[in-house]
Amino acid sequence: MPHFCLDDSPHFRMIELDEVSSTNTFLRDYHPVRPTEITLVTAEFQSAGRGQATNRWESERSKNLLFSILVHPQALSLSHLFLLREAIALSIRDAVAQHFADSPVTVKWPNDIYVGDCKIAGILIENAFKGATLDSCIIGCGVNVNQETFHFPALAPTKKQMECLQPTPCSLRQLLGCETERTFVLEDIMEGFTRRYAQLQTGHYDDIQREYHAVLYRRDGWHDYVDANGPFRAEIKEVEPSGHLVLHDEMGTFRRYAFKEVRFE
């Protein structure tokens, strides 16, 4: 397969920014005369980068990958929207995993990327609708590449962090001991994403779902979780096409959760 190039084409456009509040916000206000199938926006720094919910995404200037992708997947039914999360999560996971022969690189449901038990990348997706029809999706991504220190100490979370259930951030630089060319990582991510996006547009879902399940964080064995009723132990049964996580607990009960309804301990 030829190496993916970040060059503009009739189907792909790349916009490189120095500083922006967030790349997702930029794309929400972006209205080109001639839309392309995939629009990629990168930034050296985000003054108001966000993670899930109200979380802030920490990133030093010009150290990491901060980017958003705008797509218009009209062929994707609303019941299969979670496949977009799977497609981008797998693409980032594969790009990161190329650098590690011995450490497991996994996707923590629904779409955080982990090396071991440390978070190296996060994803935030915003969907826009026209009536009952999906109009566009903005996929915001942060991948820790060359940052050496974080506000929350990497690889050694404090007792307070553990109590607040803050994931421990890490970067390729910390784990590999050397800097990595960010452009090469981005090219690998976009190669994987454009390939999987083409599969979604033609209704080929099975391979993406199989790949996603195969690399889930805590895919095997019994682990601790917490929901509104308290702590319990369970194993992952599946992630449904809707995105719901199904756990099988020690009492033999199947528990089904939407995002934020259950917590990994």
Image: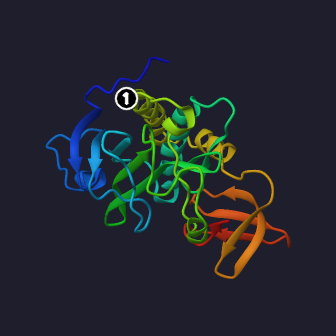
Residue 74 seen = no
| 153 relative position to 8: left or right | right
Q: Residue at x 53, y 50 (%)?
A: 154
Q: Residue at x 37, y 65 (%)?
A: 132
User: Which image quadrant for residue 32?
Assistant: top left
Question: Residue 162, position in %: x, y?
Answer: 61, 66
Indicate whether 200 appears above or below 178: below
Q: Residue at x 67, y 47 (%)?
A: 213
Name which residue type carries label 1: Thr
| 10 relative position to 33: left or right | right
| 104 relative position to 161: left or right | right
Residue 141 seen = yes
Local SS, label 1? helix
Who is closer to the viewer here, 260 or 61? 61
Indicate whether 8 appears above or below 152: above
Seen as rendered, the residue at the extreme top is 2
Identify the residue position indicated by label 1 in the image: 183
Question: Residue 20, position in %: x, y?
Answer: 22, 50
Question: Residue 93, position in %: x, y?
Answer: 55, 40
Q: Residue at x 42, y 26 (%)?
A: 184
